[in-house]
């Protein structure tokens, strides 16, 4: 019998012994006592059952019992220094340390994966000049971090790894661990983190420093953080994972990079700070504040550890990745280009606070480092995520773009000199435009989540194989998305987008296109089709071989279901139109002045089956019905040819998280040549439109003579056309929809216009 089955047989002793106990208690001599005192009977069974369980399952319970004794009951006594105090605390639990901390010290694997991903990207970009990196793990304890890092970044690919810890018993475990692995390039230093010395000088040569739940335990944390700064080379990275509590107010903002979801309630702040103080663990916010003051933030996550009792016991912890140089992109060649009037994603950071000796050496190499680091593409411009007009959005509205780029491109006539201004939406159309390699594409959206989505697509195209991108955005599901996010995508994402997708990594676990507000409409459509038993008919229509077959299924099966009285009532509800379809009340009023909601939807959908096949061209409606794309019916970035071309065209993107008006104000005169503003002007009130008036005035100022502005509308003759004419545009209709005729593959809008700057 295998040894793995023996513990299961040992557990059989529990019911056997309890049964024997019960049989013994039924003896005539004891029976009157147990009948009168039933509580004693129950208590005896509980005691015997508990003792038996502990004896039989001792291997499973000794770890938590040792942990509880060492943390809560063992007296620490008085000690002359920190090392003796730590040794007294850890000596009895050194051998069970890793097993007892698995559920308590969360986030360590994520921090190590992010650090490894950043190292790999820098190696690929040649930042280290073909040298192997050096890693110092401060407060590394038993060496668990180094063992885990080996899974993401093999230890033999480091020039040297140093584990520094002040506790002899933990260092002993670490040495035994490394000896088993045979790692000759790993050295354990049982010294103080602020003053340790290796066999060779390390100042200015270290590429990675990590601290995993150790910064909060170090008494002189100012000296430790300063020492880290002196250790790191100009390209260096620091990774930290630790418990924390926030202050009453947010610290001075560096663009909001690290402050998203950082604030704690007053109870959390005071309770955990006092609780951990008993074990000499200090959670005061000053430690983290000083860390972020000294280094530039690359990535930051603020989480809660649902320990023991989920959603009741929540210990806040953070995962943070920082850079030795705060203002690395300020030296980038991209920032100096004439056409690039804005800064890059991470460039809105103040200069590092360095000692004079370090400042000179860093300044000498900063430009060279930045030029190499910039190969790691950053598209996102900085913004303030805590502003009310950003926080109102909890998710993206559109998981897919609902305008036909083929019609746009027929009129845009893009060239290498064009500077574009487009609304982000889901980013699909912007990616289509990028295939024609204009000089710059400025993507604007007030909803941060829409830019998070486009940024994820850009990062995926830049770093993932085509099949992974297809699984994510073609099939709409990827079971390994979280691993891809941490290990591959993270270096290419801004901290904003990384925080969002870390929190919503389950979006790709099932059907991605049922997420976001637009996913509500797809969910209702799917439910309605199933209720009416039309799933097979929908599948047949989406895979029809001829227009005639497709149209017949639409007329005979699908259309009667779509235009039922219940669906008409739903479509007349302004709340549904906004939350599910993204149609605000002002836009709804525009088409209601010309027709009913039912007539508008009929004019939209009826021409579609006649236009082209869903299976090889109409990817918009194929997606809505099948909740995924078809290999032959999808946006160009999901084709192998389009994917390969885009990899060389991603530098054109700049993502602005702001209002259209604010971005236009920031642009110089005569800067833009092409603007695609979709239907957003329909959202304004025709009776009160001062903001739109200024917006069109700013369009006229920022657009070159001969430049174009394109827009779609739910009305055949939008009221704001006159504003374009007022500010010097020649307005011309490119398409006006008529009943029974489609103006493009979507046919959702009643008109398509162009304004030419005179």
Image (cartoon, grey):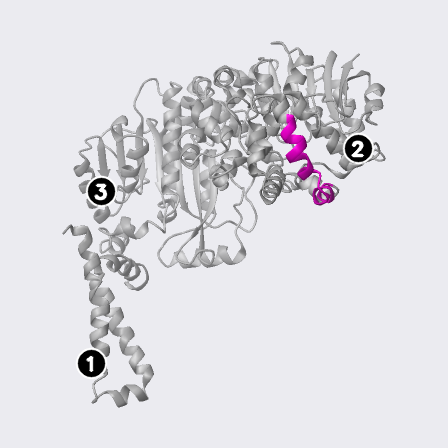
Determine which residue is flagged by label 1: 24
Label 3 sits on a secondary structure element that is: helix
Determine which residue is flagged by label 2: 591
Nearer the viewer's eye, disc 1 or disc 3? 1
Give residue 431's quadrant in the image.
top right
Of callouts 1 and 2, the N-terminal one: 1
Of callouts 1 and 3, the N-terminal one: 1
Instruction: State the extent of the magenta-drawn residues as a range.
Output: 551-571
Q: Position of residue 388 (x, y in %)?
A: 66, 42
> At x 54% / y 17%, what residue is drawn?
334
> At x 50% / y 28%, what residue is drawn?
474
Q: Position of residue 65 (x, y in %)?
A: 27, 61
Q: Is residue 72 left or right of residue 719?
A: left
> At x 32% / y 83%, what residue is drawn?
38
Label 2 sits on a secondary structure element that is: helix
Quadrant location, the C terminus: top right
Give residue 562's quadrant in the image.
top right
Q: Nearer the viewer, residue 549 or 365?
A: 549
Q: CA distance from mark 1 to mark 3?
A: 51 Å
State the mark number for residue 643: none
Q: Is residue 68 left or right of residue 437?
A: left
Determine which residue is flagged by label 3: 174
**Residue 503 visible somewhere in the drawing:** yes
Of callouts 2 and 3, the N-terminal one: 3
Q: Are marks 1 and 2 in contact (CB under 8 Å)?
A: no
Reply yes or no: does residue 521 show up in magenta. no
């Amino acid at each position: 019998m295998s040894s793995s089955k023996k513990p299961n047989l040992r557990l059989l002793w529990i019911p056997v012994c309890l049964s024997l106990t019960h049989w013994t208690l039924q003896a005539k001599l004891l029976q009157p006592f147990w009948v009168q005192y039933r509580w004693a009977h129950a208590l005896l069974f509980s005691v015997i059952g508990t003792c038996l369980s502990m004896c039989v399952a001792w291997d499973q319970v000794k770890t938590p019992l040792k942990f509880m004794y060492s943390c809560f009951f063992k007296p620490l006594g008085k000690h002359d220094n920190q090392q003796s105090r730590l040794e007294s605390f850890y000596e009895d639990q050194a051998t069970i340390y890793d097993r007892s901390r698995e559920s308590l010290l969360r986030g360590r694997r994520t921090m190590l994966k992010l650090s490894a991903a950043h190292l790999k990207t820098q190696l690929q970009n040649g930042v280290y000049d073909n040298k192997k990196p050096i890693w110092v793990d401060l407060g590394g304890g038993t060496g668990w971090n180094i063992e885990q890092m080996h899974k993401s970044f093999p230890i033999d690919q480091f020039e040297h790894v140093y584990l520094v810890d002040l506790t002899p018993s933990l260092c002993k475990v670490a040495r035994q661990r490394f000896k088993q692995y045979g790692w000759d390039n790993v050295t354990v230093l049982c010294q103080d983190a602020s003053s340790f010395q290796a066999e060779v000088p390390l100042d200015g040569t270290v590429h990675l420093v990590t601290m995993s739940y150790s910064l909060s335990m170090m008494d002189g944390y100012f000296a430790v953080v300063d020492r880290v700064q002196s250790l790191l080379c100009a390209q260096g990275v620091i990774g930290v994972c630790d418990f924390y509590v926030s202050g009453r107010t947010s610290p001075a903002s560096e663009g909001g990079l690290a402050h998203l979801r950082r604030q704690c309630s007053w109870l959390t702040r005071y309770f955990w700070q006092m609780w951990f103080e008993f074990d000499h663990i200090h959670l005061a916010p000053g430690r983290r504040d000083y860390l972020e003051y000294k280094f530039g933030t690359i990535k930051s996550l603020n989480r809660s550890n649902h320990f023991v009792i989920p959603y009741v016991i929540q210990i806040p912890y953070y995962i943070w990745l920082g850079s030795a140089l705060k203002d690395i992109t300020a030296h980038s060649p991209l920032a100096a280009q004439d056409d690039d009037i804005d800064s890059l994603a991470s460039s809105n950071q103040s200069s590092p606070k360095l000692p004079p000796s370090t400042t000179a050496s860093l300044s000498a190499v900063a430009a060279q480092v930045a030029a190499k680091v910039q190969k790691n593409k950053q598209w996102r411009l900085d913004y303030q995520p805590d502003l009310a007009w950003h926080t109102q959005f909890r998710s993206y509205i559109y998981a897919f773009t609902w305008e036909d780029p083929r019609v746009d491109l027929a009129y845009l006539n893009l060239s290498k000199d064009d500077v574009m201004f487009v609304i982000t939406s889901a980013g699909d159309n912007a990616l289509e435009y990028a295939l024609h390699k204009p000089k710059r594409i400025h993507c604007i959206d007030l909803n941060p989540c829409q830019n998070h989505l486009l940024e994820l697509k850009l990062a995926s195209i830049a770093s993932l194989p085509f099949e992974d991108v297809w699984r994510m955005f073609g099939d709409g599901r990827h079971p390994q998305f979280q691993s891809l996010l941490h290990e591959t995508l993270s270096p290419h994402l801004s901290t904003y987008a990384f925080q969002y997708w870390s929190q919503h990594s389950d979006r790709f676990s099932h059907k991605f296109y049922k997420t976001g507000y637009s996913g509500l409409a797809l969910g209702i459509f799917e439910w309605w089709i199933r209720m009416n038993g039309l799933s097979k008919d929908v599948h047949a229509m989406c895979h029809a071989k001829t227009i005639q077959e497709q149209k017949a299924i639409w007329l005979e099966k699908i259309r009667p279901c779509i235009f039922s009285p219940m669906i008409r009532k739903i479509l007349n509800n302004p709340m549904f139109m906004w939350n599910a379809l993204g149609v605000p009340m002002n836009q709804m009023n525009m088409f209601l002045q010309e027709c009913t909601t039912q007539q508008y939807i009929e004019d939209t959908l009826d021409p579609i089956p006649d236009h082209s096949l869903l299976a090889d061209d109409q990817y918009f409606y194929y997606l809505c019905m099948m909740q995924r794309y078809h290999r032959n019916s999808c946006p160009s970035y999901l084709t192998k040819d389009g994917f390969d071309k885009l990899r060389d065209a991603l530098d054109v993107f700049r993502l602005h998280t702001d209002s259209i008006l604010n971005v236009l104000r920031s642009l110089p005169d005569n800067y833009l040549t092409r603007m695609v503003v979709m239907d957003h002007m329909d959202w304004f009130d025709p009776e009160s439109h001062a903001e739109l008036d200024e917006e069109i005035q700013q369009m006229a100022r920022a657009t070159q003579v001969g430049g174009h502005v394109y827009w779609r509308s739910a009305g055949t003759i939008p009221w704001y056309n006159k504003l374009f004419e007022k500010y010097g545009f020649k307005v011309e209709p490119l398409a006006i929809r008529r009943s029974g005729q489609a103006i493009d593959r979507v046919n959702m809008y009643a008109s398509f216009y162009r304004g030419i700057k005179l």
